[in-house]
Amino acid sequence: MAKARRSAPPAAAPTGDERTVELTRRLAALLGELSLTEVEVESGDIRVRVQRAGALAPATPAAAVADERPLVADTVSPALVTVEAPMVGTFYRASSPTADPYVQEGDVVKEGQVLCIIEAMKLMNEIESKVGGRIARILVENGHAVEYGQPLFLIDPQP
């Protein structure tokens, strides 16, 4: 009498949640592998965005602001303080198109000094410096859209 063979049940197709988790894991690994700060992928009905906490971590390569330019890596001194966008909107360096910019690279600023304006829903929001120091870098071009948490300025704090 022949014995009946039991075959393993066929592997179930991954569910949407399992696919999302797997994609997220792969993207997180890609961030470290390529020294990126953010990556977004859309596949079918799944859209995943992975971003490193503290997008400009001290002394690590960081992706340049994406605005149709190629990806550029840069190093950031651990002493620099990042001023980030507190909202989504349009970045303006001056109060009007004919006015001088609030700050230039190399300018010394005080804590609470206005650095720029972000227009959101027709409201002009003044963005202030959270520390006193010297403007080391301005990371966004005038008139460009910014996302919540996007780095705007790097400030070298004064001792």
Image: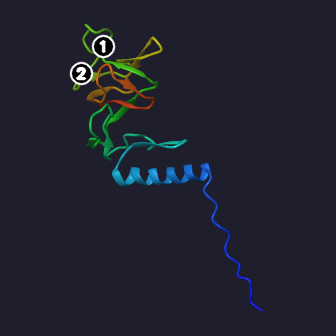
Residue 6: % across, % down: 71, 78
Closer-to-camera residue (109/98): 98
Residue at (74% x, 89% y) in the render:
2
The residue identified by callout 1 is 94
Quadrant housing residue 89: top left
Name of the residue lying farthest toward the right: 1
Query: Is residue 101 shown above or below 56?
Result: above
Q: Is residue 40 visible?
A: yes
Task: Give the residue type that dot 1 points to.
Answer: Ala
Q: Which amino acid does label 2 sit on?
A: Gln
Position of residue 99 measured from the top left corner of the image (x, y, whole percent): 26, 8
Location of the N terminus (image quadrant): bottom right
- For marks 1 and 2, give the CA distance: 11 Å
Label 1 or label 2, whichever comes before in sequence order: 1
Judged from the image, the secondary structure of the residue bearing numbered disc 1 is loop
Q: Whole-percent x and y of residue 13? A: 61, 58
* Residue 57 left/right relative to 141: right
Q: Is residue 119 left or right of residue 104?
A: right
Is residue 152 or residue 9 the one in the foreground? 9
Picture residue at 33% right of the left edge, 10% below the top? 95
Callout 2: few (<14), some (14-19), or many (20+) C-alpha neighbours within 10 Å?
A: some
Number of the front mark, 1 or 2: 1
